[in-house]
Amino acid sequence: MVAGNVGNNVEWHEDERYEGRASFSLGVTPSVFRDGRWQEEATTWYRVTCWRRLAVHVRDSIRKGDAVVLGGKLRLDRWVDQNNVQKYEYAIDAKWVGHDLRRGSALFERARIRQDPSAPNESDADAARAEYEARQFEAMMVEEGFDDGEAVDPATGEVTTLG
């Protein structure tokens, strides 16, 4: 299992044999408690690849900056570049990926079978995200003590009395 932050937007690649491939970079920065305080160690980067249905769900759900946990097969890829320099990259063939709920909340939506798995399911994902954000905003308003007779402009934070 690896936990970290997504370093770039998911890259989608069509693949006739496997319904598609999704890949992204994952930065893992371990923290250790030394001398009475937390210290961050060096970040390690991984290239994560997902196949088939997992790839479709990752494409529809994961964004740059998201905190995720994942499991899969770790390998070290080696090659020589055009300048004859030996290069290395840690790679993970993911078997599962999820948002790290220790660092935030997520709204799960059960997958529906689509006729064309290569087509993004953005309308469902966007609607779910908007509904989730509206609930978060409403909860914040209640916590801050605003009542139904007041409205807050989300851009400026300005409170207006209604009616």
Image (cartoon, rainbow, N blue to C red):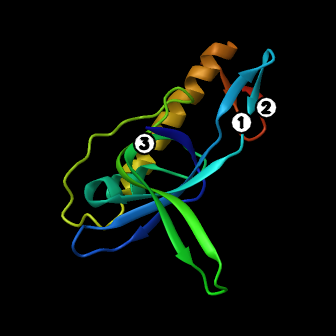
Measure how far apart labels 2 and 3 are at the Cα level. Answer: 41 Å
Q: Are marks 2 and 3 in contact (CB under 8 Å)?
A: no
Q: Are marks 2 and 1 in contact (CB under 8 Å)?
A: yes
Disc assigned to residue 158: 2
Q: Residue furthest bottom?
A: 82
Report the side of 55 relative to 137 (left or right). left
Q: Residues within 10 Å of mark 1 (few under 14, many from 20)?
A: few
* Residue kind at label 1, given as amino acid type: Asp
* Residue kind at label 3, given as amino acid type: Leu
Decide which of tag 1 and tag 3 comes sooner along the chain. 3
Quarter the N terminus occupies = top left
* Residue kind at label 2, given as amino acid type: Glu
Measure how far apart labels 1 and 3 are at the Cα level. Answer: 38 Å
Decide which of tag 2 and tag 1 comes sooner along the chain. 1
Query: Is residue 147 something one can see in this rendering?
Result: no
Q: Secondary structure at mark 3?
A: strand
Report the side of 75 relative to 67 (left or right). left
Residue in front for this viewpoint, 86 or 5: 86
